[in-house]
Amino acid sequence: MAKPISMEVWNPSGKYRVVSTKSMPGTRWIRLLTDNDCRLEICTDPKTILSVDDILALIGDRCDGVIGQLTEDWGEVLFSALKRAGGTAFSNMAVGYNNVDVEAANSNGIAVGNTPGVLTETTAELAASLTLSAARRIVEADQFMRAGLYDGWLPHLFVGNLLKGQTVGVIGAGRIGSAYARMMIEGFKMNLIYYDLYQATRLEKFVTAYGEFLKANGEQPVTWKRAATMEDVLREADVVSNSVYNYTQQISLHPVLDKTTYHLINPERLAIMKKEAVLVNASRGPVIDEVALVEHLKANPMFRVGLDVFEDEPYMKPGLADMKNAVVVPHIASASKWTREGMATLAALNVLACHLQSFRGQLISRTLLCC
Ligand SMILES: NC(=O)C1=CN([C@@H]2O[C@H](COP(=O)(O)OP(=O)(O)OC[C@H]3O[C@@H](n4cnc5c(N)ncnc54)[C@H](O)[C@@H]3O)[C@@H](O)[C@H]2O)C=CC1
Ligand SMILES: O=C(O)C(=O)CO
C-alpha cells in the first residue's frame, strides 16, 4: 500500500473528486473546476517526478478525473486504478502524449485529453531562440565575457552563422513546426524545406503568398519545398551551396514522438548533415540518438545544437554538458505565463467535459484524443 502524500484541497464539499498531480500556474483552472461542483485536490509533495505508486495513492478509492504531467507514466496500472475509483477522465497538461498509453485508457473507458494550440507560438519562439543562440554562439560568448576574457574586438571572435536568405529545414511541420517555419521565413527571409508525413498546405500557401509579396516589393522571393524523405532535407546543403552567402544548414525538429520518430536523427543521418549545421530539438529527446550526437559534436566543433529536451530527461548523456557547441535548456519551450495558464485551463476543461453536459461539444472534439 503506497503511503499517502500531501494535498491542498479546494471546495471540499464538491460532488466530483478531481486530482491534479501538480500545482499549475494561474487560478482560472481552479475556478473552472470548483465552480462546477468539483472537489479539487492538488498534490503538494515536493518531489518533482511522481512515481506510479505515488499517483496510485493520489487516486485512492474514489476519483472522477485526473490532471497529470508529461513526466508521469500513464499506462494500464494507473488507468485501471482510475477506473476502479470510478474515474472517467484524464488530461495531460501537455500537447505531447508519448507518456500516455491511449489504448490502455480506452480499454478502461477513460477519456484522454491534451492541450494543443495554446503552446504553439511559445514553443516555436523558444525553438527560434535556440536557433539564434546556437547560430550566433550566444551562450559561449556570454560565458567568455563573464570569465573576464574579453580584451577587445577581433575579426575572428565568436564568428557564427548568418540565417538571412538561407534555407531552414523543418522536420514535422504540424502546428509548432509550421509556426517556427513562419517565424524564420518572416524574420529572416529564409527558404523552407520540410519533411512531414502529411502535406502542410496552409504553410505552403503562406510561403507562396509571402514570396509574391517580397517579389512585388523588389526583394528576393522566399520559396518552399516538401521533401520526399528526411535525407532530402539533410542533403539540401548541396542544392543551394552556390548561394551568395556561405551556406549553413539550419534544421529544427518538431514531430510527435512515436515509433516512427524514435532516433530519427541517428549516426547515419548526422553524417549526411553539413559540418557547420545548426540542429534544434524542442520536440522530445528520444527523437535524437543523444550518444551519437555527443560523438558528432566532439568530432565536428562547428556543428551546433540547441536542445530543450533530452533522451533520458532530466539527465543528459555523458559528455553533452562539456560541449561548447551545445546550448541546453531544461524543457522550457512552453514556459510563458500565458501559455502555461492556458494549458492548465484546457486540462481542467478536458476533465470537466467528461462530467458536465455544458462542456461537451466543440471542446471535446478539439482537445480530447478519445472519449
Ligand atoms: N519542448 C516542449 O516544451 C514542447 C514540446 N512539444 C512537442 O512537440 C510535438 C509537436 O507538437 P504539435 O506541433 O502541437 O503537434 P502536431 O501534431 O501539430 O505536429 C506534429 C507533426 O509531426 C508529424 N509527424 C508524425 N510522424 C512523423 C514522422 N515520422 N516524420 C515526420 N513528421 C512526422 C505529424 O504529421 C505532424 O504534422 C508534441 O508532440 C510534443 O512532443 C510540444 C510543446 C512543447
Ligand atoms: O506540451 C508538451 O508536449 C510539452 O512538452 C510541454 O509543454
Image (cartoon, helix red, strand yellow):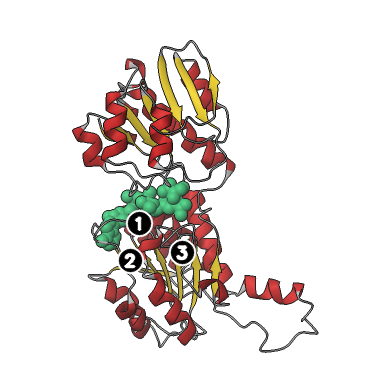
Q: Residue at x 71, y 77 (%)?
A: 144
Q: Position of residue 194 (x, y in %)?
A: 33, 66
Q: Quadrant of residue 146?
A: bottom right
Give the answer, above or below, for where 215 lies relative to 236: above
Are there few (<14), some (14-19), or many (20+) residues within 10 Å of tag 3? many
Single out the mark in the foreground, 1 or 2: 2
- Kindly identify which residue carries mark 3: 185
Which of the labelled discs sits on residue 203, or is there none? 1
Give the amino acid at mark 3.
Ile
Q: Check the picture and name the quadrant holding the N terminus.
A: top left
Are there few (<14), some (14-19), or many (20+) residues within 10 Å of tag 2? many
Q: Position of residue 47 (x, y in %)?
A: 54, 43
Are there few (<14), some (14-19), or many (20+) residues within 10 Å of tag 1? many
Q: Are marks 1 and 2 in contact (CB under 8 Å)?
A: yes
Q: Quadrant of residue 310?
A: bottom left
Q: Secondary structure at mark 3?
A: helix
Q: Check the picture and name the quadrant holding the C terminus.
A: top left
Q: Position of residue 330 (x, y in %)?
A: 54, 57
Residue 229 appears in the picture as rendered: yes
Residue 175 appears in the picture as rendered: no
Give the amino acid at mark 1.
Leu
- Kindly identify which residue carries mark 2: 194
Single out the mark in the foreground, 2 or 3: 2
Give the amino acid at mark 2.
Tyr
